[in-house]
Amino acid sequence: MNHSETLRILSVLRAAYPAFYKDMGRETLDGIVALWQSMLADMPYGVVNAAIRALIAGDRKGYPPHIGAVMDHVRRLTAPSGPDEDQSWSRIERAVANSAYEAEKEFYRLPEELQQIVGSPAQLHAWSQMEREAFDTVVASHIRRSLRARIARQEEMALLPPGDFNSTLLPQNTP
């Protein structure tokens, strides 16, 4: 979004919540515009506008949405819908079921993010040799925890404003 688009977004908020903005001076409003501009700079105006209007329509408290709520709503509107935790666990279960003799083939059928969680074809094979009850409790708990951590990390990374963070500093193979 550019500066004029940011002004348009904040004008909508000011119209929807006049009491909130009524006593703000020019300097304060300029600071608000600058902050919103920097935080939403890489987001398309149309999506931010849709998010703002949805948040206004769903508001039950009478306060304007904060930047984090807008960014979260934009992320939900634009994020590709990938497999959830249950779907991912089901894929791993199917891979394990066929891994007594086909572990390598099953491992490379998994999406890359699940390969990182599983670790190796040898791990799939080892799980295929476990008692089912231990696999369904211990391994399932570990995998689901790893999946939740990976999803949370991806969500946190998606919220970072552009240019404020160098993702090459983070380890790439952590959940």
Image (spheres, helix red, strand yellow):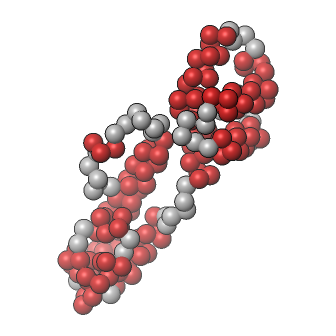
Residue at left offset 67%, top offset 33%: 5
Left or right of residue 117, residue 76 in this image? right
Q: For this rendering, which residue is in front, 138 or 4?
A: 4
Residue 6, percent from left and from top? 65, 30
Q: Quadrant of residue 137?
A: bottom left
Residue 20, percent from left and from top? 72, 19
Left or right of residue 23, residue 121 in this image? left
Q: Quadrant of the C terminus?
A: bottom left
Q: Is residue 132 visible?
A: no
Residue 154, percent from left and from top? 42, 51
Residue 11 lies, with reference to residue 109, above or below; the image says above
Residue 172 lies, with reference to residue 117, above or below; the image says above
Q: For this rendering, which residue is in front, 22 or 6?
A: 6
Residue at left offset 76%, top offset 31%: 12
Residue at left offset 59%, top offset 53%: 78
Residue at left offset 42%, top offset 35%: 163
Q: Is residue 105 visible?
A: yes
Residue 41, percent from left and from top? 55, 35
Residue 75 lies, with reference to residue 126, above or below; the image says above
| Residue lying farthest to the bottom in this orientation | 101
Q: Quadrant of the N terminus?
A: top right
Q: How many marks?
A: 0
Q: Quadrant of residue 18?
A: top right
Left or right of residue 86, residue 170 in this image? left
